[in-house]
Image (cartoon, grey):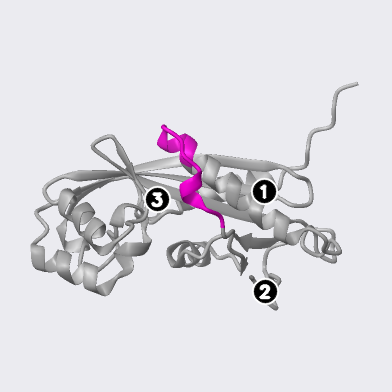
């Protein structure tokens, strides 16, 4: 079970953030965006959620992660919905899949599958489809969207693939696609989209959704 999320001692933003992900890439990117945050994980069975369209799948998974974390936070005294100044807490969840030749790929289930995934990208391309969902725990406002990118590769030598598998990180990323690795990056020939989108957390989209989730709800017209 996760420990209760805690706000870093000093924050330059008038709200708190809980990142609902154990991804080191998402943590790094959110830090690069200048935010302080705590981390919780959802602990859901992602394989139990199946959708035909990648955009629908990643948005559904992001929502399922948010629901699971909200369930963990139930029964608290309100600390996690707003801080002492009445400012909100934002819960950020995300998900990503890789699409190769029309087939959705999630995290490899084995070293052999990871090897097959990476080898198939050699002299080819892969697309990433990622989602970001921002839930304002004070107002209940939810803002989510998807982002896509494409990565094209030169031939990836077998010894490089062997080293990637031995290093092991490819086992924990969608489609075994690890373009930021020093082992892989020399063989990227082109990219359509941003590196942060390929890594599973598009900065511009995340910032846009954060700001939208902070908006004051509109009052009904009488």
Farthest residue toward the bottom?
Answer: 9
State the residue position of label 3.
197
Q: Helix or strand or loop: what does disc 2 sit on?
A: loop
Mark 1 packing: few (<14 Cα in 10 Å), some, or many (20+)?
many
Q: Nearer the viewer, residue 47 or 149?
A: 47
On the image, the x and y values in percent for residue 88 come to 76, 56
Q: Residue at x 79, y 33 (%)?
A: 218
Dots 1, 3 in contact, CB < 8 A:
no
Q: Can residue 15 be spotted in the picture? A: no
Q: Residue at x 27, y 59 (%)?
A: 179
Q: In the displayed structure, would residue 124 be above or below residue 35?
A: above
Whichever of labels 2 and 1 marks the residue nearer the N terminus, that label is 2
On the image, the x and y values in percent for residue 117 come to 23, 52
Q: Residue at x 35, y 50 (%)?
A: 194
Mark 3 packing: few (<14 Cα in 10 Å), some, or many (20+)?
many
Q: Helix or strand or loop: what does disc 1 sit on?
A: strand
Cα distance between the residues tagged 2 and 1: 20 Å
Q: Nearer the viewer, residue 207 or 171?
A: 171
Dots 3, 2 in contact, CB < 8 A:
no
- Closer to the observer: label 2 or label 1? 2
Q: Quadrant of residue 192?
A: top left
State the residue position of label 1.
135
Mark 2 packing: few (<14 Cα in 10 Å), some, or many (20+)?
few
Q: Helix or strand or loop: what does disc 3 sit on?
A: helix
Q: Can residue 117 be spotted in the picture? A: yes
Cα distance between the residues tagged 1 and 3: 20 Å
Range of the magenta residues? 44-57
Q: Nearer the viewer, residue 193 or 187?
A: 187
Where residue 3 is drawn, which disc sits there?
Answer: 2
Whichever of labels 3 and 2 marks the residue nearer the N terminus, that label is 2
**Residue 78 belongs to magenta span:** no
């Amino acid at each position: 079970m996760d420990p209760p999320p805690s706000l870093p001692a000093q924050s330059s933003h008038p709200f708190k953030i809980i990142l609902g992900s154990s991804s080191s890439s998402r943590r790094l990117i959110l830090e690069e965006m200048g935010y302080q945050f705590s981390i919780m994980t959802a602990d859901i069975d992602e394989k139990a959620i199946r959708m035909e369209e990648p955009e629908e799948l990643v948005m559904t998974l992001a929502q399922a992660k948010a629901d699971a974390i909200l369930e963990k936070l139930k029964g608290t005294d309100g600390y996690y919905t707003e801080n002492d100044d009445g400012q909100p807490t934002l819960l950020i969840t995300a998900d990503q899949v890789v699409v190769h030749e029309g087939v959705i790929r999630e995290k490899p289930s084995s070293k052999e599958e990871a090897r097959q995934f990476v080898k198939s990208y050699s002299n080819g391309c892969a697309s990433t489809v990622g989602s970001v969902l921002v839930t304002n725990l004070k107002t209940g406002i939810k803002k989510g969207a998807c982002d896509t990118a494409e990565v094209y590769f030169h031939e990836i030598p077998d010894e490089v693939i062997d080293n990637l598998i031995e290093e092991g990180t490819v086992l924990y990323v969608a489609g075994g696609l690890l373009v930021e690795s020093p082992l892989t990056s020399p063989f990227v020939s082109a990219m359509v989209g941003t590196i942060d989108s390929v890594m599973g957390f598009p900065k511009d989209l995340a910032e846009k959704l954060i700001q939208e989730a902070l908006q004051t709800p509109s009052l009904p017209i009488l």
